[in-house]
Image (cartoon, helix red, strand yellow):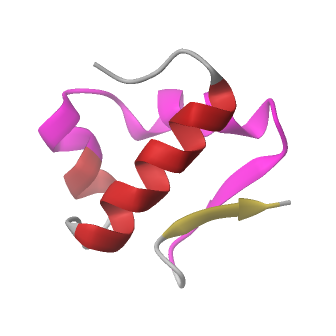
């Protein structure tokens, strides 16, 4: 289960992307969530996914 707090979510997701998953799609498939849902939750606190960096970064 992913954290509800958006900043904890950011930390968990970026750590998993860095350590274990080559893309956001692969991470979301493993977590059984939609990339759009994760992106919209993090966009609410000013972060967007950068495929180039495979991380969520400040917008």
Image: 48 above or below 12: below
- Residue 48 part of the magenta segment: yes
Q: Residue at x 23, y 65 (%)?
A: 21
- Residue 20 part of the magenta segment: no
Q: Residue furthest bottom?
A: 52
Q: Is residue 27 in view?
A: yes
30 relative to 18 in the view: left or right: left
From the viewer's side, name the closer residue of 3 and 22.
Answer: 3
Q: Residue at x 43, y 48 (%)?
A: 13
Image: 18 above or below 33: below
Where's the N terminus, which quadrant?
A: top left
Quadrant housing residue 2 = top left
51 relative to 17 in the view: left or right: right
Q: Residue at x 36, y 31 (%)?
A: 34
Q: Residue furthest left?
A: 30
4 relative to 46 in the view: left or right: left
Q: Which residues are magenta?
A: 28-51
């Amino acid at each position: 289960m992913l954290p509800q707090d958006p900043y904890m979510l950011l930390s968990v997701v970026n750590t998993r992307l860095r350590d274990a998953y080559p893309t956001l799609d692969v991470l979301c498939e493993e977590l059984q969530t939609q990339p759009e849902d994760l992106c919209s939750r993090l966009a609410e606190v000013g972060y967007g996914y950068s495929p180039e960096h495979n991380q969520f970064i400040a917008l």
